[in-house]
Image: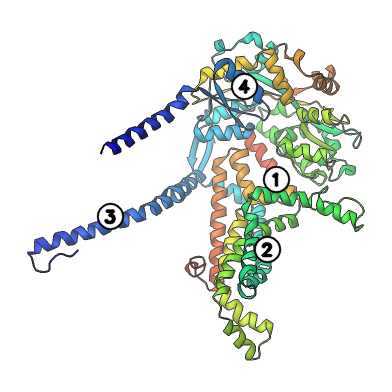
């Protein structure tokens, strides 16, 4: 009998021990993009605060899906683009408002912080603050495809089977701008917006013969461009900068109608359990030196004030080549997407994807 | 159980009732895991999916009951075409798997002996030791423009420039057949195994040639295995997501990819559920039709196989 008691006590003790471990080590569950939370930064954060960071790599649509599935639980901090907060928040209530007093505003570039605050505000409450920004446009191998300056050039017959795109909203909207439309101005007018995206969808469908394969993650695209199978693509600037570091012929090219600018934010999921750790992480990664480490790993630019001084010279050179001041002035920033528009875009994109 | 036969009636009833209760309890205990599995993993999610598919979005966070998700699916030719395409391609792939798998299974069951038999069986099983993703990537390395086959053809001087063999329907077919071959071979081997060699010999003795013996003796005997294998392979093909998505590229969208995009990319669970339900009904219907046409029953094929 004593033996049995001993075993039970032992079991109970071990159960209590294992239960106690997660309580002792605090964790931050971060839902973010690839390369936004490099190992080195996570380690520094752990050294500074004792908090472990669990990273889940995601994208805009996946973040919304994941948070919708749980009603906003499972993560303590998410990083959706600023234009993708208003619609999903209205539809699914997956975020909670931020307490701006807990964020060190002096670490941010004021214009980016203000823009993100304005774009993510619902009923006077702010749901997101800026972290990294970048653009969508073209990545071109200048030696093999010297004359690609716009989305329409991707559809030239000499590049049949040699281009790639990501079949998501930036391709659709980029095509709309290339056709001379202004979809952003039509955000409030559903009928007009439908007409514009129908037109852009038809152009994408007509362009399908030129597409070798639609890419979905940046690794797919890197593969196709590195092997020379694809000479030009609709892509993020960060992909262009990454390839530029390996082969100077390849770089990001802002389309003549203007690159499409996005800002990825920090947002708090509605049922996050560790807001304190989330605010600590935000204030930690916005310090200039840390922010520069993230910029080097992600290839996108930070809303952290002064971080550009610490960025690697190679990346800075690629950026300066792709973004002279007049190109920056022409960037079209994604305004917040009102609820309902994404469903309309989805149907148009489905038609492009399934059509022959 | 061993109660004496003659005591008072009340005394005899008690143990018998006890025995029945114990039997009932043991039945419940044995049945419980199965019932729980069916209810929690199959029934509840499917019902949930069905109710979700009947929700119409009226406005932000406002839903009503109605069939709009289904009418939208069938009203949009793109979705219907994808479904038809997926079904036809799956049927073709199943047929091709049968044509390729039958001789293999026959060889393993009837001709190979001893070690050779084990080796052959293992070589069918071996690809399944790595995940489907790795197998598909293997095919991508072989078929892509800068891949093995393209280089080989160029090296042999058969083609002038690099050829793209990936991102088309044939690549999808190859991938599907490769992925599901084992599920055709195993039921075929087990039914062919039970075919008495004497029957085949008798067929020849009675003057039948190879084709007649195959058609009159081997195939009728193997029918349950053929139907079982075909059903499993067809279901696997229809519900496959990875292979068509990775090998098929831009023009060969599979219906599962539509479901994925409704759920994950468009976060439109309502229409995604409707899509899922339509796929479930379609596949059940086709399996039922195939069973009717071949004169088999589900218990006589899958149940045995």
Which subunit holds the residue at mark 2? B
Spatial CA span between label 1 and label 2: 25 Å
Q: Residue furthest front?
A: A3
Spatial CA span between label 2 and label 3: 49 Å
Residue closest to the eye, A305 or A181: A305
Q: Which residue is mark 3?
A: B25
Q: Which residue is mark 1?
A: A351
Q: Residue furthest left?
A: B8
Spatial CA span between label 4 and label 2: 53 Å
Q: Which mark is first along the chain, 3 or 2?
A: 3
Q: What label sits on residue B92 in the rendered view?
A: 2
Residue A10 placement, left or right of A154: left
Q: Is residue A157 above or below residue B234?
A: above
Residue drawn at (85%, 55%) of the image: B152
Q: What label sits on residue A43 in the rendered view?
A: 4
Residue closest to the eye, B3 or B233: B3
Do dots 1 and 4 share one subunit?
Answer: yes
Q: Which mark is first along the chain, 4 or 1?
A: 4
Q: Position of residue B142 (x, y in %)?
A: 77, 52
Q: Is residue B202 above or below residue A214?
A: below
Q: Is residue B236 above or below residue B4?
A: above
Mark in front: 2 vs 3: 3
Do dots 3 and 4 share one subunit?
Answer: no
Dot 1 falls on a residue whose secondary structure is helix
Spatial CA span between label 3 and label 4: 55 Å
Q: Quadrant of residue A254?
A: top right
Residue B253 in sight: no
Q: Is residue A348 above or below residue A72?
A: below
Q: Position of residue A55 (x, y in %)?
A: 60, 29
Name the quadrant of the N terminus of chain A: top left
């Amino acid at each position: 009998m004593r033996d049995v008691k001993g075993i039970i006590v032992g079991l109970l003790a071990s159960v209590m021990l294992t239960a106690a471990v997660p309580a002792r080590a605090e964790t931050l569950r971060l839902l973010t993009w690839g390369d936004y939370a490099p190992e080195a930064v996570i380690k520094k954060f752990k050294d500074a605060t004792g908090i472990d960071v669990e990273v889940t790599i995601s994208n805009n649509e996946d973040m919304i899906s994941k948070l919708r599935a749980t009603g906003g639980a499972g993560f303590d901090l998410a990083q959706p683009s600023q234009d993708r907060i208003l619609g999903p928040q209205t539809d699914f209530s997956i975020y909670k408002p931020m307490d701006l007093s807990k964020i060190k505003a002096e670490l941010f570039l004021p214009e980016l912080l203000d823009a993100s605050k304005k774009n993510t505000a619902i009923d006077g409450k702010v749901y997101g603050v800026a972290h990294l920004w970048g653009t969508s446009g073209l990545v071109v191998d200048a030696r093999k495809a010297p004359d690609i300056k716009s989305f329409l050039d991707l559809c030239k017959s000499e590049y049949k089977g040699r281009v790639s795109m990501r079949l998501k909203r930036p391709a659709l909207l980029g095509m709309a701008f290339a056709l001379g439309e202004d979809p952003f101005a039509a955000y409030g007018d559903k009928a007009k917006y439908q007409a514009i995206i129908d037109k852009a969808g038809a152009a994408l469908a007509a362009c399908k013969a030129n597409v070798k394969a639609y890419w979905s993650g940046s690794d797919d695209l890197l593969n196709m461009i590195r092997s020379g199978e694809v000479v030009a693509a609709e892509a993020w600037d960060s992909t262009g900068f990454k390839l530029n570091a390996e082969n100077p012929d390849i770089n990001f090219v802002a389309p003549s109608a203007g690159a499409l600018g996005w800002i990825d934010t920090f947002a708090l999921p509605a049922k996050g359990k560790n807001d304190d750790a989330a605010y600590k992480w935000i204030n930690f990664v916005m310090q200039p030196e840390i922010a520069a480490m993230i910029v080097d790993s992600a290839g996108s630019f930070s809303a952290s004030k002064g971080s550009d001084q610490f960025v690697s010279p190679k990346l800075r050179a690629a950026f300066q080549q792709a973004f002279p001041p007049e190109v920056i002035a022409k960037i079209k920033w994604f305004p917040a997407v009102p609820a309902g528009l994404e469903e309309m875009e989805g149907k148009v994109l489905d038609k492009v994807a399934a059509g022959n | 159980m061993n109660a004496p036969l003659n005591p008072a009636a009340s005394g005899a009833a008690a143990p018998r009732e006890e025995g029945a209760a114990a039997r009932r309890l043991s039945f419940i205990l044995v049945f419980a895991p199965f019932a729980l599995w069916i209810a929690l993993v199959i029934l509840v999610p499917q019902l949930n999916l069905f109710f979700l598919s009947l929700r119409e979005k009226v406005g932000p966070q406002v839903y009503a009951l109605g069939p709009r998700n289904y009418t939208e699916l069938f009203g949009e030719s793109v979705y219907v075409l994808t479904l038809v395409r997926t079904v036809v391609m799956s049927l073709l792939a199943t047929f091709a798997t049968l044509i390729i798998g039958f001789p293999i299974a026959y060889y393993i069951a009837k001709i190979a002996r001893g070690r050779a038999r084990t080796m052959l069986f293992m070589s069918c099983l071996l690809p399944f030791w790595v995940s489907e993703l790795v197998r598909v990537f293997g095919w991508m390395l072989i078929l892509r423009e800068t891949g093995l086959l393209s280089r080989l053809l160029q090296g042999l001087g058969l083609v002038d420039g690099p050829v793209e063999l990936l991102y088309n329907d044939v690549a999808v077919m190859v991938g599907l057949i490769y992925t599901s071959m084992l599920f055709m071979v195993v039921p075929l081997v087990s039914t062919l195994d039970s075919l008495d060699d004497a029957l085949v010999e008798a067929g020849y003795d009675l003057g039948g040639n190879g084709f007649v013996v195959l058609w009159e003796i081997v195939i009728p005997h193997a029918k349950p295995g053929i139907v079982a294998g075909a059903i499993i392979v067809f279901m696997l093909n229809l519900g496959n997501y990875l292979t068509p998505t990775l090998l098929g590229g831009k023009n060969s969208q599979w219906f599962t990819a539509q479901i994925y995009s409704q759920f994950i990319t468009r976060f439109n669970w309502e229409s995604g559920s409707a899509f899922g339900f339509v796929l479930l009904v379609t596949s059940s219907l086709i399996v039922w039709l195939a069973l009717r046409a071949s004169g088999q029953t589900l218990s006589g094929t899958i149940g045995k196989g």
